[in-house]
Every structure is written in C-alpha cells, then in structure tokens.
Image (cartoon, rainbow, N blue to C red):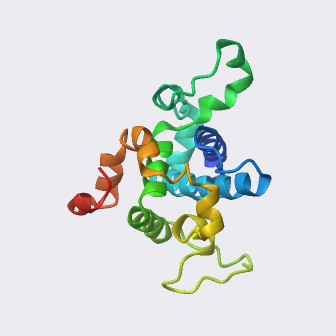
C-alpha cells in the first residue's frame, strides 16, 4: 500500500516509539516487544493517514511540526528527566492527536475496522509493486492484520497496549474528533466511554 507521503515517516516513527514505551510489551522477550511494537505502528499509521490524508497535509506537518509529546507524557506519567531531554529530541515529532486516535483504535476493534476501511478508501493500493500477499476484496488487509485480527501471541504481547482502561487517559483526549471523522458518533453507546 502506498502511503499518502513519506513526510509522515518521522511522525509515525516517533509516535510509535512513544506508544511502545508508554505501554511496553507484556513480557520482556524481544519477540513480544516486536509484536507489540508492530501493533502500535499499525495503529499509529492508520491514525496518521486519517489525520494527514493528503500530501499537502503531510508537507505542512513536516514544516510546522506535530507538537510534541508534552501533554501525553504528563497524562501517562512518563515525563522524561530534565537531564534526558536533550537525548530525547524524537519527542518533538510525536503527534498528540495521532497517538490518541491510535489508542482509540487499539482499544476498540470495531473502531479500528472503521479506521482501516476509511484509509483503504482514501489511499490507493500500489498495484505497480508486487506484493507477497495480494489483497482479496473484503478480506483483512495484510498491512493492518495485527491491528484488526491479532492472534493469541499478539494479544499476549500487547496486553498493556490494548487495555481500554489503561489507554483511556490518552484515548479520551481526541476521541470525539475521531468518532466524528469516522461517522461513528451514532454508535458511541457501543464504544468504550
């Protein structure tokens, strides 16, 4: 799948890193860490593509910057020490809205499906590049499989990352905007509060 723009790479990388550090893998082994981070990256990617759907949007965020992680750090209680701030310049590339939307997607499978469907409708598939897993209409896209249909290992690895109560302080920041964007407001009663 082609992305809307390569300009979003720093935002996606930094936001994924923040989410993975705030909600670490369920066990200390490297496989669990990788599986958890893959799920975070898929949710962040969907959220970033929803937030910045055009190349112009992505170019503007690359120029202006996404805002940083200060509010998220405070909400999650993961503020870095003053001495560590210089070494953690990546935090300036974290997008608060993208992380909040990703938290919503990780906590609610139905909302995640709506988000991925919206992205698939807006972002054309790159048919010029061969794909190891051809897309089957109506099937779960392989690019977002771990977000939409996590297996048992995925769920064990991301037990903190997918816990609705733990994610709530981050998800609630910008949930209303995501619900409006995905036309999910009428189903709000079915979604976690």
Identify the image quadrant of residue 87.
Answer: top right
Closer to the camera in the image, 93 or 31: 31
Identify the image quadrant of residue 92.
Answer: top right
Asked whether residue 52 is in view, the answer is no
Which image quarter holds the N terminus? Answer: bottom right
**Left or right, residue 193 beside residue 123:** left
Please name the residue shown 57% across and 75% down the image: 141
Please name the residue shown 67% across and 32% down the image: 90
Closer to the camera in the image, 24 or 50: 24
Q: How many marks?
A: 0
Q: Where is residue 136 drawn, in percent x and y? A: 57, 86
**Left or right, residue 44 beside residue 10:** left
In the orientation shown, which residue stands out farthest toward the right?
30
Q: Where is residue 19 drawn, in percent x and y? A: 58, 43
Identify the image quadrant of residue 31.
Answer: bottom right
Asked whether residue 108 is in view, the answer is yes
In the orientation shown, which residue stands out farthest toward the top?
82
Please name the residue shown 52% across and 27% down the image: 77
Please name the residue shown 57% across and 36% down the image: 94
**Left or right, residue 135 beside residue 182:** right
Q: Where is residue 10 drawn, in percent x and y? A: 66, 42
């Amino acid at each position: 799948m082609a992305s809307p723009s390569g300009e979003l790479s720093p935002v996606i990388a930094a936001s994924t890193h923040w989410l993975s550090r705030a909600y670490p893998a369920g066990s200390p082994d490297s496989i669990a860490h990788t599986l958890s981070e893959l799920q975070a990256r898929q949710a962040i990617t969907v959220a970033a593509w929803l937030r910045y759907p055009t190349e112009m949007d992505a170019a503007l965020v690359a120029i202006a910057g996404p805002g940083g992680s200060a509010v998220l750090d405070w909400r999650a209680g993961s503020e870095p020490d003053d001495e560590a701030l210089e070494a953690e310049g990546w935090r300036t590339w974290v997008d608060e809205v993208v992380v909040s939307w990703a938290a919503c997607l990780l906590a609610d499978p139905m909302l995640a499906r709506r988000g991925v469907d919206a992205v698939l409708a807006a972002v054309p598939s790159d048919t010029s590049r061969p794909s190891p897993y051809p897309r089957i209409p109506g099937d779960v896209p392989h690019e977002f499989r771990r977000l939409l249909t996590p297996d048992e290992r995925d769920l064990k690895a991301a037990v903190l990352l997918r816990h609705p109560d733990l994610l709530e302080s981050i998800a609630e920041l910008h949930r209303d905007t995501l619900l409006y964007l995905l036309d999910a407001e009428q189903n709000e009663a079915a979604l976690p509060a």
